[in-house]
Amino acid sequence: MKLQNVKDPEKLFRVIDSCQGKIELVTGEGDRLNLKSKLSQYLSLANIFSVKEEIPELELVAYDPGDVKKLIDFMINE
């Protein structure tokens, strides 16, 4: 799923932390980073904010249907 115009990445990572299954960030090169890992979260944030103050687009893969719902709810309510 693609998330666009994420203005509150800290809130996004709180949602990701609450997810039951694995959540992966798909990089521009096609690599997948496990966002349940704090190290991956910090590296992702550092990389994203070195370019922009707002995240224009992220591609995430969620394996649990409940987690997909949480991420959709996040985007609707952000």
Image: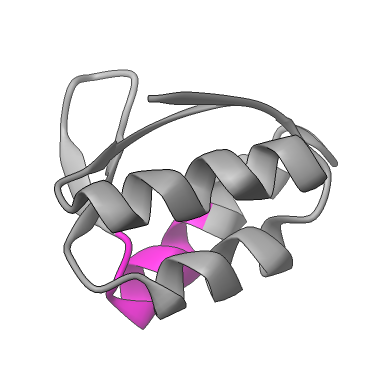
- What percent of the width, then of the height, locates residue 29? 23, 19
Instruction: Examine the structure image and report whether residue 74 is included in the region drawn in magenta.
Output: no
Left or right side of 58 for 67: left
Left or right side of 6 for 63: left
The residue positioned 24% from the left and 73% from the top of the image is 20
Instruction: Examine the structure image and report whether residue 41 is included in the region drawn in magenta.
Output: yes
**Number of marks drawn:** 0
Q: Please determine whether, in this image, residue 18 is positioned above or below residue 10.
A: below
The residue positioned 34% from the left and 19% from the top of the image is 28
- What percent of the width, then of the height, locates residue 62? 24, 45
Residue interval drawn in magenta: 35-44
The residue positioned 61% from the left and 59% from the top of the image is 12
- What percent of the width, then of the height, locates residue 63? 14, 47
The residue positioned 85% from the left and 41% from the top of the image is 53
Q: Please determine whether, in this image, residue 56 is positioned above or below residue 10.
A: above
Nearest to the observer: residue 44 or residue 64: 64
- What percent of the width, then of the height, locates residue 49? 71, 47
